[in-house]
């Protein structure tokens, strides 16, 4: 009979196997490029050469104009105590979005760098206003700065662009103090004496957030960073969580016709979202996946008819920043934080608030994790104690029947089925139930899964200092102390609960479980967040002491 850690290992191994074979069988294969056909066909293209040259000439002119406009680019900054946002006059878009209280470990850099949520600043496409017929007149040319100032508790910046004589567009951004919320107001103003229509208006964010797909391997952190997700919630409370394949070779766009409370793009720790103030002026939402691992999302608005001497206003709120559970809960967006399956979330939320409470007392997330581990193990002391006592009792009985089992192995060495039958009779005779101690362990599984999920996804642990070399509990242990400690304590647990095996095959399997699993998991743990390993190691140490206490006591 193995200890509780062994039973949890089965789940982890199955999960790892599924992920391995999924990547092996279902990930896209390299595309083979077709060889050009008969070169004599090139003679058929002669009549089109002049048109191609015209198109190339137009593209060169556009490129030259864009480069000229880029040289005229100016940048302006608004900031609060949490973020620093740099706006470009090219398209009046965000060019940099820096989080002041979080840091990244990128490549082989010894020092951490600030978290930058704009992975491709020269795409000029973050909080982009797009309209096909006006694209060259609003996106690729400088806008005029109209205002930048602190307005009460808000930081305000306003850009304007005259798209044609008498027709103006204003983009106004408001950033409150101590907030990751950014309000965008778009004002269309008609100063003409005749009506003016604007169609196919789109407002979008992208590509991606934090990292482009090709840059993710440079990031030195724990598990889970290699993904992007689209999440949204409809006004009827229908919630969707969609995984995106950043390695896809195909491009596609998905439209959402239902009215939404919010839509967002996220990786494991950070997100960008749109929270429209009015849904009646929205035509549809969308997200677009482009080959190469590029993702954008946004809103398509209904057509606008500007009467003479009138204006029309569109407002979109955004939360752009870390997935801090309490901040998102205030916006009714707490589902953006991955806390496991729906049945597990209540336990995960309780774990989060427990860690948060202990952090307020200790001011150290590492100490908070240790205290929570001890509290949980204390609450589970009685069921664990019953399980360990059962295992001890079974070990004694197995030692008593060991000579008879050895005899059975010799007598029925060529008849495994008969050997199994006789072994089970022997178990019944001595009232040995190999699974008798499993139920108390199963009761602990939901708590373990909740801790596992919460500790991996808590952005609050990013950059959280513990002691000495452990300067970021969301990152792997740089000196592998915790993975090795976890492996050693797991091996000790296995040895303390080993029982005689009924057959040579079972004995071989037991040796694999006793020695192989700790070694295997130790190597996997080299890339796991140190916060998770801290919990696991302390829990193992607690279990060892409890098992030692049971082994020394009299039943």
Image (cartoon, rainbow, N blue to C red):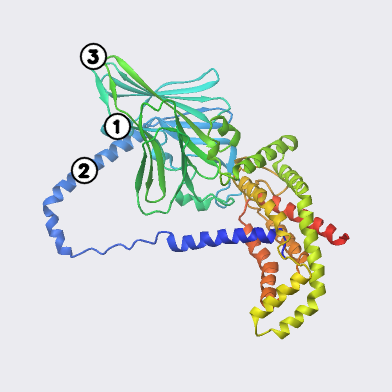
Left or right: 442 as drawn, with respect to 58: right
From the image, tell me which residue sits under label 3.
193
| Residue 7 against residue 144 in the figure, above or below | below
Q: Around disc 3, counting alpha carbons within 10 Å, would you say few (fewer than 14), some (14 to 19), or many (20 or more)?
A: few
Residue at mark 2 to residue at mark 3: CA–CA distance: 38 Å
Residue that appears at 18% across and 48% down: 52
Question: In what element is the residue under mark 2?
Answer: helix
Residue at mark 1 to residue at mark 2: CA–CA distance: 28 Å
Pick whichever of labels 1 and 2 is earlier in the sequence: 2
Whether residue 533 is visible: no
Pick whichever of labels 3 and 1 is earlier in the sequence: 3
In this rendering, which labeled residue sits more in front, label 1 or label 2? 1
In this rendering, which labeled residue sits more in front, label 3 or label 1? 1
Q: Which of 234 and 495 lies nearest the eye of the viewer? A: 234
| Residue 522 against residue 130 in the figure, above or below | below
| Residue 278 against residue 540 in the figure, above or below | above
Query: Where residue 59 appears, x then y in whole percent?
Result: 25, 42
Q: Are marks 2 and 3 in contact (CB under 8 Å)?
A: no
From the image, tell me which residue sits under label 2.
57
From the image, tell me which residue sits under label 1.
200
Q: Around disc 2, counting alpha carbons within 10 Å, would you say few (fewer than 14), some (14 to 19), or many (20 or more)?
A: few
Query: Where residue 32 appears, x then y in whole percent?
Result: 33, 63
């Amino acid at each position: 009979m193995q200890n509780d850690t062994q039973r949890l290992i089965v789940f982890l191994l199955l999960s790892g196997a599924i992920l391995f074979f999924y990547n092996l069988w279902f990930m896209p294969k390299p595309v083979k490029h077709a060889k050009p056909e008969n070169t004599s066909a090139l003679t058929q293209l002669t009549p089109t050469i002049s048109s191609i040259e015209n198109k190339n000439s137009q593209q060169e002119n556009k490129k030259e104009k864009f480069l000229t406009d880029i040289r005229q680019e100016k940048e302006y900054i608004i900031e609060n105590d949490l973020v620093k946002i740099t706006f470009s006059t090219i398209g009046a878009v965000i060019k940099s979005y820096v989080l002041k209280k979080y840091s990244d470990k990128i490549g082989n850099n010894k020092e951490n760098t600030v978290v930058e949520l704009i992975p491709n600043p020269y795409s000029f496409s973050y909080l982009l206003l797009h309209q096909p017929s006006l694209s060259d007149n609003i996106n690729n040319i400088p806008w005029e700065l109209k205002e930048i100032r602190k307005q009460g508790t808000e930081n305000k910046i306003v850009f304007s662009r005259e798209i044609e004589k008498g027709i103006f567009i204003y983009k106004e951004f408001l950033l409150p103090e101590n907030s990751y919320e950014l309000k965008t107001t778009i004002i269309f103003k008609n100063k003409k004496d005749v009506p003016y229509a604007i169609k196919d208006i789109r407002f979008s964010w992208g590509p991606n957030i934090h990292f482009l797909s090709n840059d993710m391997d440079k990031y030195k952190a724990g598990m889970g960073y290699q993904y992007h997700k689209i999440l949204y919630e409809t006004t009827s409370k229908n919630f969707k969580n969609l995984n995106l394949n950043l390695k896809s070779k195909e491009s596609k766009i998905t439209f959402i016709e239902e009215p939404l409370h919010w839509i967002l793009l996220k990786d494991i720790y950070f997100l960008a979202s749109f929270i429209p103030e009015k849904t009646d002026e929205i035509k549809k939402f969308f997200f677009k996946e482009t080959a190469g691992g590029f993702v954008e999302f946004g809103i398509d608005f209904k057509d606008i008819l500007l009467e003479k001497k009138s204006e029309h206003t569109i407002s979109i709120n955004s939360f752009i920043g870390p997935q801090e559970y309490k901040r998102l809960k205030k916006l009714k967006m707490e589902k953006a934080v991955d806390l496991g399956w729906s049945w597990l979330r209540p336990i995960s939320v309780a774990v989060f608030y427990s860690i948060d409470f202990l952090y307020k007392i200790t001011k150290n997330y590492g100490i908070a994790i240790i205290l929570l581990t001890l509290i949980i193990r204390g609450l589970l002391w009685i069921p664990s104690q019953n399980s360990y006592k059962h295992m001890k009792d079974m070990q004694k009985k197995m030692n008593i029947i060991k000579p008879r089992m050895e005899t059975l192995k010799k007598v029925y060495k060529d008849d495994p089925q008969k050997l199994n039958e006789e072994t089970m009779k022997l178990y019944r005779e001595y009232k040995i139930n190999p699974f008798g101690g499993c139920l108390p362990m199963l009761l602990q599984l939901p708590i373990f899964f909740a801790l596992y999920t919460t500790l991996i996804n808590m952005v609050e642990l990013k950059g959280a200092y513990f002691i000495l070399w452990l300067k970021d509990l969301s990152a792997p242990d740089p000196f592998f102390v915790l993975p090795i400690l976890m492996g050693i304590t797991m091996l000790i647990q296995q040895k303390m609960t080993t029982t005689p095996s009924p057959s040579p095959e079972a004995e071989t399997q037991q040796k694999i479980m006793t020695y192989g699993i700790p070694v295997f998991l130790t190597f996997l743990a080299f890339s796991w967040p140190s916060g998770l390993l801290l919990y696991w190691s302390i829990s193992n140490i607690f279990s060892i002491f409890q098992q030692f206490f049971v082994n020394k006591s009299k039943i």
